Amino acid sequence: AQKITQTQPGMFVQEKEAVTLDCTYDTSDPSYGLFWYKQPSSGEMIFLIYQGSYDQQNATEGRYSLNFQKARKSANLVISASQLGDSAMYFCAMRGGSYIPTFGRGTSLIVHP
Amino acid sequence: DSGVTQTPKHLITATGQRVTLRCSPRSGDLSVYWYQQSLDQGLQFLIQYYNGEERAKGNILERFSAQQFPDLHSELNLSSLELGDSALYFCASSAVGTGMNTEAFFGQGTRLTVV
């Protein structure tokens, strides 16, 4: 079985600052993928970034980067230079041997002007 | 735009009724997933179809059923609806390989309200 834990129900950040959203995972699968999604108030789920368990380098997509620490089983999302439009729910997910994406409970991010 | 289309966007119905939610996956995606998102349960996996066949089942109630048609669109049928079934229902699709590195793309969801 695989499990995703997001311990921060809510986070606040000042506009233009960086913020880190925590995600830890648990799986017995030797190979897996980690994902982050953004859900704005409108409700849609938007794919942000992917990290493979065998990738040597941390994934980066624009202002998003994934701080992957395999030994600690963590896959934290870093958003640099926060913008007001970044205010949303953020979900960490993983896909292992079952190929079913499993999601964490999410972190609500509020960006202050 | 993710390329996944869900209809309807909103649905209000009474307890005991039956509804059908529809999903058209991204062009070429063979795999369709259904998720339920409620405030207290987070995003719960319901069921997966791959090229017309049921592939995996999650926490799907017996009152709920799904199918995937030859044109790859999928329908989620919810019957004998209860107040607790009120939630946002998502459909997601992923590419042919369904490997570890293929992200799932989500539709905009159907918000179901049971009154």
Image (cartoon, rainbow, N blue to C red):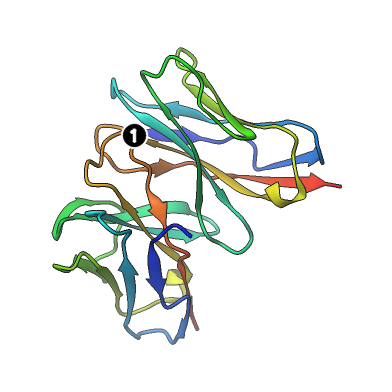
Pointer 1 local density, CA inside 10 Å: few below 14, some 14–19, many at least 20: many
Residue at image point 64% right, 61% down: A41
**Residue designated by label 1:** B101
The percent position of residue A49, horizontal first and vertical second, equals: 50, 36
Q: Is residue B67 above or below residue A13?
A: below
The percent position of residue A3, horizontal first and vertical second, equals: 41, 34
Which quadrant holds residue B3? bottom left
Please name whichever residue, B83 or B12, is drawn nearer the observer in this view of the structure: B12
Which quadrant holds residue B92? bottom left
Residue at image point 37% right, 48% down: B104
Q: Is residue A75 above or below residue A12?
A: above
* Residue A59 visible somewhere in the drawing: yes
The percent position of residue A97, horizontal first and vertical second, equals: 25, 32
- Which chain is indicated by disc 1? B
Please name whichever residue, A113 or A100, is drawn nearer the observer in this view of the structure: A113
Q: Is residue A36 left or right of residue A21?
A: left
Report the amino acid beneath label 1.
Asn
